[in-house]
Amino acid sequence: MKSGCVSREVKKQRSIQLPVLKNPPVQESGIRKSRTSRWRAAALITLNLLMIAHIIQWRIMGTTISPIEPSETMHTLQKGAINAGFIFFALAILATLILGRFVCGWGCHILALQDFCAAMLKKVGLTPKAFRSRLLIYVPLIGALYMFVWPTVYRAFFSPEPGPLIPTFTNHLVTSSFWETFPSVAVAIPFLFICGFMTVYFLGSKGFCTYACPYGGFFMLADKLSPGKIRVTDACNQCGHCTATCTSNVLVHAEVKQYGMVIDPGCMKCMDCISVCPNDALYFGFGKPTVAIPKSNAIKRSYSLTWPEEIVGVIVFVGSFLAIWDVYQLVPMLMALGWATITTFLALRTWRLLRTKELSFYRFNLKSSGLIRKAGWGFLSLAVVWIGLNAHSGWVRYHEYEGNRAFQKIQIPDELALAQVNPDPWLSPIDRENIVAGRNHFQATADLGLFVNTEALPKLAWFEYLSGDAEQSVQSLEQAAARQQGQAKALSLYYRGTILNRLGRYEQARTSLDQALAERPDLILAREEKGESLWQLGRKEEAISVWSDAVLRNERLVLANNQLAGAAFSMGRSEEAIALEKRADQFTPDDPFYHWMIGLRLQNLGMNNLAEKHFQRAIELDPGFEARRTGRPQ
Ligand code: SF4
Ligand code: SF4
């Protein structure tokens, strides 16, 4: 008896009994139909229905259990937020350590999608063919390490502000922001099409699991340690039905012959091989794990790529992934991984199409006798469009990256830049350089990009404002706010309102600031600005009320206390004004820039005496500020 094999008697004691049909149907190929595939389909359909029910319950009730999605584990590892996704992932890895990759085969919605797509393709006579690469197989593990290990390593050893290795844990099992970490529906649809249909069509039935799924990276490792395996008895006659049926591209007959069990970590324990075996030679049982198998025993496998192709494939994959990931702030990592595998496949096939005399794909003859056929031209067209789109995304991504870099390097504080309509006198040479570079980069993506990057647009607006183009900046912020939600929208509207105040368009400013506060009532800066709009519109009591409200929320607000003091002075309420001024001074940082900024803001409101006090203090702290008086608005 081979290592890992057990007799039929032992099998009876240790195997898990599967539900069986009395007369299993036989397909045209002579291979039995799997009896377990229906059970698995039922499990996966139930899973999808439960997911839909979860979303509906959240939409109706407003709060729900946090997403049961492995990616949520990142928040646990980085911020200590214990959520349902983390618990699910931890339990799934634990279960895989014992039983093997059952969770993948019976409990993953992306796998369900791939199975559905494979079934659809089969209906039109296209049986997905497995793409076999030696190197790309490591993508899931690298993805998993990047998602779940690298953030902790970075925080502990490389971050400029190192944090603890283990964060402080907090309870995030219930949430009202269920969709916060998910892509929008507009992104989810192409995501499902690419990661489901396209990966299956080009890379095989489990194309996404094999070459892109980062969770699979950890499940594969756990599977290697698990004692639960598909095992064989001596009834096997090497007919190969199991291998022909396996949609995970496992050489079942060869592995059970060599090792007495299936050791390929791609096995998702779907049980189809057990079900179709005409000799009932396979069973699920416990015994030696894969790691106990000597490496010298490895089965020789055939691959889809030559070694040079493998190396080119890795380069194409990395380039494609970096080009597409997060482009337009839209493409999530998993989608980028799926996209990059398809780019790699198309690039390598195109290369082969151009180099070889004969090439086919599925039943399509792409090239014969050195001539590219109709289907070949169709394939080439698809490849050119796909790779061209990828290259364009890379170009956009480059400009976004450089634009963001320039944005990070801007030194002028926002409050100071916003204190007067033209911040030019306050810009350092480094600022000027980065403003020109950043504006050009973001403008290029805005002009020639295929989608609007809602995070880049407010940054472009900021560069426009710093360049002295306040009108254009107001327009860009309006466009950004129209596409944003929540905090991001509130900030765009706040900046727009602030710039409108500086431009003297107070009614428009007030409307914009009201909209910002409707999104985020806790945005105190917007209250200070709204008070300014109202004051300039002559609605002084309302302005005082808004500033008072801001101070009630935070009594340390220097500007709002000063604004209230200025208002009290202007109304002859000196005692109250002095008390407010005192409170403001108590919290004012003794920084010349800060004093100058407060001076400018008070001067805008006509509160000149108070303003002068801050200008003088700035000059006392730094006599160089005297020369800046020329930069003050008149
Ligand atoms: S395990 Fe069963 S299906 Fe697979 S080769 Fe052996 S007899 Fe055939
Ligand atoms: S080896 Fe068997 S159980 Fe594993 S994935 Fe293939 S058919 Fe399913």
Image: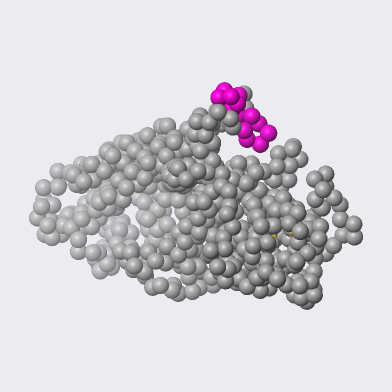
Q: Main secondary structure of the magenta part?
A: strand
Which image quarter: residue 616?
bottom left
- Please tell me whether residue 581 is drawn above or below residue 28 in the rendered image: below
Q: Position of residue 392 (x, y in %)?
A: 44, 35
Q: Position of residue 359 (x, y in %)?
A: 59, 32
**Magenta part of the chain:** 360-373
Pick the residue in front: 364 or 253. Answer: 253
- Please tell me whether residue 603 is drawn above or below residue 561 in the rendered image: above
Quarter of the rendered image showing ligand 1: bottom right
Q: Position of residue 434 (x, y in %)?
A: 26, 43
Residue at position x 44%, y 45% in the image: 311
Q: Position of residue 309 (x, y in %)?
A: 48, 42
Does 456 sit left or right of 468 as displayed? right
- Please tell me whether residue 371 is drawn above or below residue 633 in the rendered image: above
Quarter containing the N terminus:
bottom right
Which image quarter: residue 371?
top right
Residue at position x 40%, y 53% in the image: 526
Residue at position x 90%, y 57% in the image: 23
Residue occupying the far left of the picture: 623
